Image: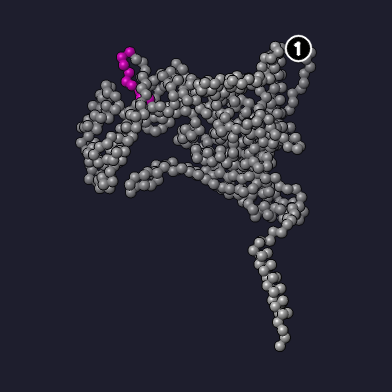
Amino acid sequence: MASSHVKPNTWLFLRLPSETLKCLEIKPNTIIELGRLGSFAANSLLGRPYYYTYELLEKKDGEAQSRLRIVKPSELNAEITGEVEEGTSGNGSPAPEEALDKNNRLTVDSPSRQTLTQVDIEELKKTAAGQEIIDRILANHAGLDEKTVFSKAKYMLRKRSKYLKRFTVLPMEAGQLIEFLMDKEPGRILEMREETLGLIGVWSNVHVHGSEEVDRDANGKRVGGGRWLVVDETGGLVVASLADRMGILRDDEDEEEDDMQNGSTSINGHTNGDGDIDMNEGSATNGATKPASHRDFPPPASTNTLTVLHAAVQPNLSLLKYFGYDSSSPNSAHALHTHLKTLSWLQLLHPEEDPTYREPPVIAEEEMKTWKSGKRGTYWKKRRRWERCQSIVDETREGGFEGLVVASVMDPVTILQHAVALVRGGGTIVVYSATVEPLVRVMDLYSKERRTAYIQLIAKGEVPDTEDFPLDPRLLLAPTLQTSRIRDWQVLPGRTHPAMTSRGGSEGYVFTARRVMPLEGAVEARGNFGGRGKKRKGVVGEEAAEGNSAAGAAVPEG
């Protein structure tokens, strides 16, 4: 959960009067430039709550930057609804008769109908506030009364966005980040919209795992434990959304501060209620403390983790920096530092060929004492990196994940060939694609008809051909292909239609299925599976036949 107020060195959005978003990082003792709106000191926003609208005031004599004024909600509501005027209803909407009768057919929209010149407006900007300029423009407009209520509303909206120096502070959330990137770099996030990202999160069933221990099956392998396998090529957008659902996206310091504001503090992971406080293993008990792990290569967490598979040397998770986590220089206090695990496809399929997975040579202590401190530090750094890499690779190859989430430009068939087997029975499979064609092929490969043909070949003792069956259709059940897109509509009497300026682009499709474990050996069906209707009909027929024979025997001859 994001913090409720602005903190230093955090990323946020400013919604400008033009309805566009400006992304920036709040750094203390700096100046924030907003183009034609002006500039103000970043310290003016520190400690202020989110979702408030601020207005830049005119600079007084001796002031280097503009001051900010909080626009009251009642003032914003009055601008939206409007005053009760003649010809309008109480909520500011036009009366039915005016909305249907009045039109702009005979209205002459000419610049000459505005008596104020551009020079006069520029002079007003130097001395008057934004709302005063708008009032003067409306008062000097000769044809304002000829406009309909809808036309007036559009006219007022244009003037407010042009002359009011306002902005709204919004927190860094996945929805705002998608809106910002869809206007700037839609290909960076594979043109994934907010509703599609929500669909992925729901079907993947990502949630917080309450236990701190991972369950194990009869063979001792890990099963579940709130661990999800992710293939993310959206720059970390999918990882951020899933981590937010698991409660590991934000910095731990933000959560502790929110707890203190709610009247509770956290000590060693437990709140300071009336009960006793359990001390962790690392707490000072008898004068001895457990040595802390290294901040760069800490032991990975066992539950509530996201394991990211990537094709390059390093994963592309650049969007996580907006949430306080930079993979190039990670913050050891961030929850993702231990709950986010990364490994390459080479480490998953052929770990022995990866140099990071190979164990460095063990050096005797006597020889190490002769080394300089820099060389010893390099040696232990390699050992810690190898231990962390080995732990992540071995755990991933062991499998037992809760689910698999894929958002990649790679062929999903090549991904599912190796990743489906790592998901536990009953786990969820979610694959996103900007176009429908790759997922249509996946639907065919896991269809009921292909599964039946696959089972028949196995029953005959034949080996299915990999060209016809690149995937095992028995491993997934109930494959589904779906899409979701929210469209903006203009709702006016007699003029209701989708917004004509909506952005195009790809629709975005999501493939979902459930992981199942095929039964080894032959399948036998026992029991009577005949329908009750047929059975009852047969019984009635037998009784009728017996009755007829008995009746025939009772009839005397001649």
Residue positioned 28% across, 34% down in the render: 83
Residue positioned 48% across, 21% down in the render: 7
Q: Does the rendering let one see residue 409?
A: no
**Relative to 411, 350 lies left or right:** right
Q: Tell me where the magenta segment starts and ends, as one range.
A: 54-62
Query: Percent from the top left, x then y, of residue 397?
Result: 70, 35
Query: Percent from the top left, x then y, of residue 85?
Result: 25, 37
Is residue 61 highlighted in magenta? yes
**Relative to 96, 532 lies left or right:** right
Q: Assign the C terminus to one quadrant of the image.
A: bottom right
Mark 1 lies on a secondary structure that is helix
Is residue 243 highlighted in magenta? no
**Relative to 526, 80 lies left or right:** left
- Label 1, on which residue? 369
Query: Percent from the top left, x then y, of residue 247?
Result: 57, 30
Q: Farthest bottom residue? A: 558
- Predominant SS of the magenta segment: loop
Residue 374, relative to residue 339: is it above or below?
above
Q: For this rendering, which residue is in front, 74 or 273?
A: 273
The amino acid type found where label 1 is placed reads Lys
